[in-house]
Amino acid sequence: MAGAKYEELKAAIRAYGEAAFQNLLKCRTLADAIIEGFRAFEGCPPENVAAVPAQGSFDPRKVYGDEAFSFSSREVIILEPVRFGLCLIVGNAEDQGALWLRTVVSAEIIGESFDVFVASQPVIRVPIDYEGKLGPVFEAVHAEFLETFTLEVNEFNDTRFRTGIGFLRG
């Protein structure tokens, strides 16, 4: 007969496993909604948005399925944020080329909501019942992609740097 301490430990492990599994399932469903919704938000063809691995090389034309998610490489499900790469393919107007933009989205359940992070931007709280409430996530992804280019262009166009080197007065 198992002792009370051992049973207590087994119950804690069971609760952890259930929480980890629910977190994975719900975050995976949220990720699908983010990917589908971002296509509509950007107004681009559906094939221009894809889930890709968050790190390493990738091809947005490949259908990664679960391989796009951080949990795919684990043998054991643990209670942690679920990460995936969101890729936007932007065609070039001048030629047949295209640019592949990728940002990392991370989500986990905290209480009665999801904590969603887009790259290193501040947390976005998304209710568990998120239908119609993902606008802030789409805005953050769009801003992340846009800033990739606008920050450097703004620095390039900054006239304060045209006539010399040195320190700027505060």
Image (tube, grey):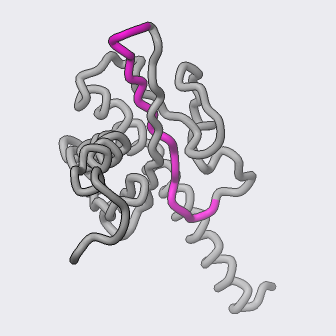
Q: In the figure, residue 132 lies in which quadrant?
A: top left
Residue 41: horizontal and vertical position, in percent? 23, 31
| Location of residue 31 in the rendering, given as x and y in whole percent from the top left corner | 42, 42
- Residue 11 lies left or right of residue 83; in this view the side is right
Toward the viewer: 77 or 150? Answer: 150
Q: Nearer the viewer, residue 163 or 113?
A: 163
Vertical comparison of 56 with 161: above or below: above
Q: Left or right? Give the position of 55 relative to 92.
A: right
Residue at the image point whose x is 33% and y is 16% from the top: 45
Name the residue rendered at 46%, 28% in the picture: 50
Seen in the picture, residue 123 relative to 137 is either above or below; the reply is below
Q: What residue is drawn where x is 24% and y is 50%?
A: 158
- Using the image as rendered, state which of residue 22 and residue 109 is in the foreground: 109
- Quarter of the picture holding the N terminus: bottom right
Q: Is 43 left or right of 36, judged from the image as shown?
A: left
Using the image as rendered, state which of residue 119 and residue 2 is in the foreground.
Answer: 119
Residue range in magenta is 78-95
Image quadrant assignment for residue 80:
bottom right
In this rendering, the answer to whether 159 lies above or below 98 is below
Residue 19 falls within the magenta-colored stretch: no
Residue 144 visible, this orientation = no
Q: Is residue 63 left or right of residue 98?
A: right
* Residue 81 counted in the magenta span: yes
Quarter of the image containing the C terminus? bottom left
The correct choice, above or below, for 88 with respect to 22 in the image is above
